[in-house]
Image (cartoon, grey):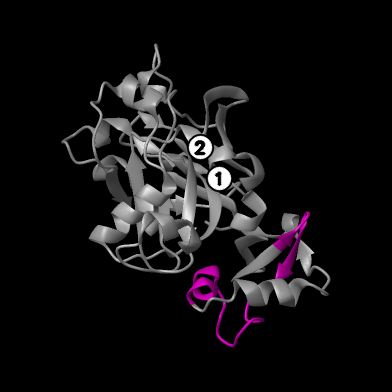
Amino acid sequence: MKFVSFVRMGRVGFGAVRNSEVVNLTGKLKPGVRSLKRALADDLLGEAESYCANRSADFALSDITFLPVIPDPGKILCVGLNYQKHREETGRSPTDHPSMFVRFPDSQIGHRQSLIKPNVSDHFDYEGELAITIGRGGRNIAEGEALSHVAGYSCYNEGSIRDWQKHTIQFTPGKTFSGTGAFGPYLVTPDEVGDYSQLPIETRLNGEVMQKAELSDLIFSIPQIINYASTFTPLVAGDVIVTGTPGGVGFKREPPVYLKAGDIVEVDCGKVGTLVNGVVDENAL
């Protein structure tokens, strides 16, 4: 199944996507369950499948404003340098463990919303990635059990303000400016995706391919990442892990390519969907 978080007629909700329509699940599966994060916490995705089986859609996708797949995750953990070509283009040495940092939830936007280039920098870079959302929490999750903790897959544009990222050895200032992380369009359940390692990933800027790889190219696999992350912090339903970006980022091109107002960025992960976002200047808001 595919799930979406949205705003419609001023109300926040979530639903199941069927072709170009939405079955509204807000408050339908259990009293008080009005968000996808809460539905995951209450283990209701199976209930959602039963609920949708014999129901018509409630409205069209064109009638909603997309929110980030999980608008309010407790954690957003991001993996850096997780494709060989990206590691090589940055000049970084191999490591025995994933490089991990965090984003804040209020840095996120949804599908077809505008990424915000901040006034303080002209070094706004794209980073197309695959994100996973945790459905079943845990601590010290074994690699062999890790994929059973994944509720679904999504596209992510983990936009980076490169000069702020390089102020010190700590990435955080460049990784969590408001409106720089796009997350969507959907949460696609593992049964629809199949073997995630066979997924393609491609980032296009104004129609030009900038990044292209397959998820099999990850240095640290998703089970390895979940095992590592769950060792230093408990994972809970609704947590998000962004798994890394391929080579071809803008700041390592000659000349560098940075996002500017009017650009359109697409992150295409095959069965998981295509995340599309424009770019606006902060001072135009």
Residue 31 in which image quadrant: bottom right
Q: Amino acid at mark 2?
A: Leu
Q: Which residue is mark 1?
A: 196
Residue 104 location in percent, x, y? 34, 55
Q: Which mark is residue 255?
A: none
Query: In the rendered view, would you say 40 is above or below 6?
Result: below
Q: At which x and y percent is residue 70?
A: 50, 61
Q: Which residue is mark 2?
A: 215
Q: State the residue at coordinates (34%, 20%).
A: 89
Q: Residue at x 63, y 50 (%)?
A: 193
Whether pointer 1 and pointer 2 mark residues with C-beta atoms closer than 8 Å, the reply is yes
- Magenta span of residues: 17-41
Mark 2, residues whose alpha carbon is within 10 Å: few (<14), some, or many (≥20)? Answer: many
Q: Who is closer to the viewer here, 166 or 222?
A: 222
Q: Residues within 10 Å of mark 1 (few under 14, many from 20)?
A: many
Please state the horizontal and vertical placement of residue 135, each as a whole percent of the image. 49, 66
Q: CA distance from mark 1 to mark 2?
A: 7 Å
Question: Toward the viewer: 119 or 266?
Answer: 266
